[in-house]
Amino acid sequence: MNDIFRRLDIAASGLTAHRQWMDLIAGNIANAETTRTPEGGPFRRQLAVFMEMQDADGQPRGVKVAQQIGDDSELRKVYNPQHPDADAQGYVSYPNVDVVMEMVDLIAANRAYEANATVIEAAKSSAQRTIGILQA
Amino acid sequence: MSIDKAIAPIDRVISGIQPVVAQPSGSPLADSGDSFVSILRGQMDDLVALQDNAAQMQQALAAGQIDDLSQVVMAVQKADLALNFALQLRNKVIEAYQEVTRMQV
């Protein structure tokens, strides 16, 4: 029974993975000015790493977010000695989040989500079309 | 276009459907008298399982236990497609039965 719904499952995994990516982007934008995290230090831009999923026999099973990694690029330094998180020289480290970049990623994630939703619609209508052969 | 070429796509579609309908172990009709019923029952069990899954997902969503809406939508969609298929199958069977009852003796 599962093979009939393989296309649906694959496209649904795409929906899930891109939703998770959008969650990370939302977090990046929300934390664009965050100087404190539970792990200590300023927030770092979070990236999603996608991984292909396969059956034991190598058949495609879709995609998943394999891991979430922090962007190691340089943090933004702003001189503000009054800030409680300023270093000895009076510089505050702000997250390496570029909101414009995040908006571009958000558009890409949104379009990818829509593409997967379109695959689901196509799979659904082809299945309905096949069932429709029985009618007449 | 020759007729052979025109029919080829239909043949491919039918050969694609057959693995779904055919039972894995030999010819179902040769086994015993109630094989068709057992196939139907197996399909019905699958259908019920899909419906149950969809119902559970909806309940979990309503209770706020699910954070991925697409999983719920997929479960409902699968149940819907399976029900549609079962319904069409049922219509076909009833149709065949009526065809037999209307037979002139």
Image: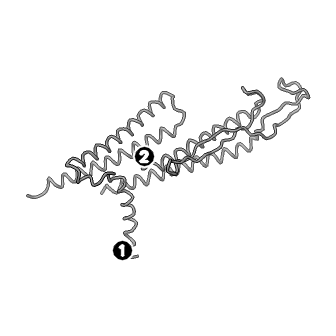
Location of mark 2 (residue): A2
Establish whether labels 2 and 1 are both on one chain.
no
| Relative side of A29 to B99, left or right | right
Label 2 – label 1 distance at C-alpha: 35 Å
Q: Under tag 2, what secondary structure?
A: helix
Q: Please state which of the two labelled residues, at mark 2 or mark 1, is closer to the viewer.
A: 2
Amino acid type, residue under disc 1 in the picture: Ile
Q: Please give the chain letter of the residue carrying mark 2.
A: A
| Coordinates of residue A15 in the picture (x, y in percent) | 55, 44
Q: Under tag 1, what secondary structure?
A: helix
Q: Residue at x 76, y 39 (%)?
A: A97
| Coordinates of residue B53 in the picture (x, y in percent) | 41, 36
| Relative side of B33 to A46, left or right | left
| Relative side of A126 to B98, left or right | right
Q: Please give the chain letter of the residue carrying mark 1.
A: B
| Relative side of A86 to A47, left or right | right
Location of mark 1 (residue): B3
Q: Which of the pair A40/A130 is nearer the observer?
A: A40
Q: Residue at x 47, y 40 (%)?
A: B73
Crowd rating for badge 2 (residues with CA inside 10 Å; few <14, some 14–19, many 20+):
few
